[in-house]
Image: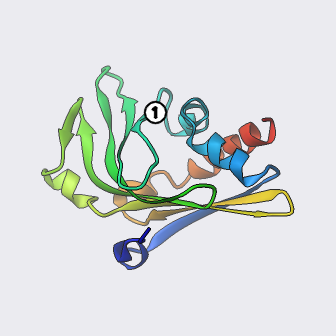
Amino acid sequence: MLESAALKSRMASLQYSIDIAAPVHTVWTTMLGDETYRDWTSAFGEGGYYEGDWSEGSEIRFVGQEDDGSLSGMIGTVVASRPDKFVSVEYFGQIVHGEIDTTSDDAQAFVGSYENYSFEETDGVTTVTVELSDDEMMNQFDDVWPRALGRLKELAENR
């Protein structure tokens, strides 16, 4: 289970953290389970979901619907997955109007960008830390992440 050196040193990062009064496994399954993922990520846009799974080496697609009904999103590889501890996705493409794009200038602009989720439980409280590439693609969500994590907290604490 190697973490890519690129994840640690290629780019500066944005970081968000929240304490959730729930066991780490509850928080992990709430964050990454299909139904609850769709709920807490609605802060980024209604109807978003993922295709694939969170196991190491898997391709995963984060998909949403545009106003015109076409699908858009990002495509990545789960480069590390340690249940209840850490998961990392490195991006290599995008979905534009339902088509996979890994070669355009827009797609190439965020190749190698990442999202890391860390989980640490102390005395029944789990701290979730999200680290993202600090690049043009990711920092557009800077104001949304705190709302999304707040919803994750609400969901996990009520399970």
Helix, strand or loop status at disc 1: strand
Instruction: Specify whether 90 is left or right of 35.
Output: left
Classify 103 as above or below 37. below
The three-letter code of the residue at mark 1 reads: Tyr
Relative placement, left or right, of 13 versus 18 is left
Work out which quarter of the rendered image holds the C terminus and state it. Answer: top right
Q: Residue at x 61, y 33 (%)?
A: 36
Using the image, determine if residue 39 lies above or below residue 136: above
Question: What residue sits 42% from the left and 66% below the top?
Answer: 134
Observer-nearest of 52 and 21: 52
Q: In this view, does 74 lie to the left or right of 150?
A: left
Toward which corner of the image does residue 127 lie, by quadrant? bottom right
> Residue lying farthest right?
123
Please state which of residues 59 and 48 is positioned toward the viewer in this rendering. Answer: 59
Q: Where is residue 28 in the image (x, y as percent from the top left)?
A: 64, 49
Query: How many numbered marks are there?
Result: 1
Say which quadrant the N terminus sits in.
bottom left
Counting from the top left corner in percent of width and height, residue 156 is at 74, 41
Which residue is most to the top? 69
Q: Which residue lies at the image location 37% right of the left edge and 72% below the top edge? A: 4
The residue pinned by badge 1 equals 49
Towards the viewer: 148 or 27: 27
Tell me if mark 1 has few (under 14), some (14-19) or many (20+) residues whose alpha carbon lies within 10 angstroms of its own.
many
Residue 142: % across, % down: 52, 55
**Residue at the location (26% across, 38% down)?**
95
Question: Residue reaching furthest front?
Answer: 1
Residue 105 position within the rendered picture, expressed as x and y whole percent measured from the top left: 15, 55
Vertical arrangement, residue 120 with respect to residue 54, above or below: below
**What colour scheme governs how the chains and residues are painted in the rendered image of this protein?**
rainbow
